[in-house]
Amino acid sequence: MRLSAALLGFGVKLAAAVVSLEVKGSDFVDPSNGDRFQVVGVAYQPGGSAGYNPALGFDPLSDGSKCLRDAALMQILGINAIRVYNLDPDLNHDECASIFNAAGMYMMIDVNSPLVGQSLDGTAPWTTYTSAYLNRSFAIVEAFRHYPNTLLFFSGNEVISDADSGAIDPAYVRAVTRDLKSYIAKHSDRIIPVGYSAADVRSVLFDSFNYFQCSISGDANDTSRADIFALNSYSWCGDSSFTTSQYNALVAGFTGSSVPVFFSEYGCNVPAPRIFTEVGTIYSDQMTPVFSGGVVYEYANEVSDFGLVNISSDGTIDILQDFYTLQNQYNKVDFKTVQTTKANGTDATAPVCSSKLITTKGFETNFTLPKLPPGAAEILAKGVHPLPSGKIITISDWNVNYTVRNPDGSTLVNLAVKPLANNAFNMPGTQNATTATATSTSTSSPATSTAAAKNAGLGRADLVWTPAVALAAILPCLFTLLL
């Protein structure tokens, strides 16, 4: 993708399509108008863990042409945020970040990866909490802090999954949160939130929440305190309800939160096909006073069969029916009202850290955090080396050059990203007919096209941390199916 010589010759600069959001109390807030922001997101890790390969020089945000293809489809769907799990700080992400920015989409970035030395070992975190690990985590911050659409960083994902891990991991995850926030405060020109993405294992979920949102120093300026808390939840399965799914228990448990809470993954795929009836509840008055939306798992189909599209090895895409089912559910929601609700206006008080906040026997109650490992203080003070950098660039061509097929085998034509106005973000129901239209030009039958698309995902491993489908998480769904 080329910089537009004509535009640059006239000194035209690409306006930021999104405004950098801020955290105020339990809300994401648009500082330009005071509106509370609700996440309408999708997990974006094409290829699963194989989609990130530093040795071969690629990750999910390193190929602008593919990001353009996917951003165009996400605009049609109504997405305003993507979550990206595994990234290489040494690669250039300017094209992809600029494309998603212009398309009106924020980026939630995990600082860890499945590779050795690039995440905490949950069974012995003290062995992996090293200066090399922090240098790599800080490098992710450096690579993405310049983009206005970088919404937040996740310091950990599903590290705590039971009472045993709850006994040893919380202090180290909180220490990483502290270190990332300290690095951002010293080296970034704006504050970018840092928080944790938890498994929805109810026996330790609220203990994890209380451990990370409380203030050791007794005030909200505690640098080790999480700015946000998210959960990967798969308790709404099929045509469930607010109470059957136990969403009511989540709302009750997080009411009064001092930080934004949202689903960092949702979208149970048993039973199939998915019908996404939880969407109407997530963005309803039952949940929006407490939750800030959610991230559907996931965009690209892998062996675990959660995808909205199938991506073939040649880059062509087959849209799955789940894509349109989800779009239909989004279109039932009045997002213009949802996204223009004013923030709560007052900051909830962070609880003071105390063993009284913890209810699970054996869960960590010590809030004395690990000190920086040897050598990390210098990195924190001087910055990482070599120093990654990023900037929004001008994109000269917004047209998609990959074939994209509907579930019936028809092909989308004139597919392109539609750059949004300054300070705008994407919203369901605004990019449908004008962005792409269908024409029955495909020579393959719907059955053949679907089968080929299904096979395209086989043999690729999902993320090392697959969705929270541990027994504790799926029992409610299985029980519901048996009733």
Image (cartoon, rainbow, N blue to C red):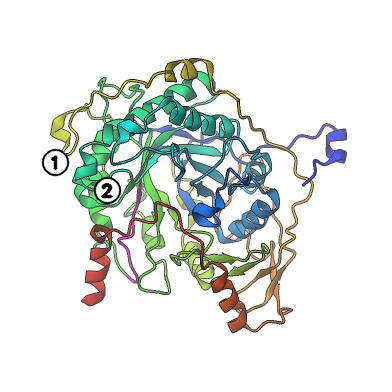
- Is residue 236 one of those drawn in magenta? yes
Disc 2 or disc 1, which is closer to the eye?
2
Compared to 77, does 21 lie above or below?
A: above
Residue 155 relative to residue 393: left or right? left
Q: Residues within 10 Å of mark 1 (few under 14, many from 20)?
A: some
Name the one closer to the observer, 424 or 415. Answer: 415
Secondary structure that dominates the magenta span = loop
Compared to 462, does 176 lie above or below?
A: above
Distance from label 2 to label 1 (Cα)?
Answer: 15 Å
Compared to 141, does 234 lie above or below?
A: below
Q: Residue at x 47, y 15 (%)?
A: 378
Q: Please tell me whether mark 1 sits on a helix, a strand or a loop.
A: loop
Q: Quarter of the image holding residue 75? A: bottom right
Q: Quarter of the image holding residue 143? A: top right
Q: Quarter of the image holding residue 130? A: top left
* Kind of residue at disc 1: Thr
Q: Residues within 10 Å of mark 2 (few under 14, many from 20)?
A: many
Which circle marks residue 161 in the picture? 2
* Kind of residue at disc 2: Ser
Question: Which residues are drawn in magenta?
Answer: 230-239
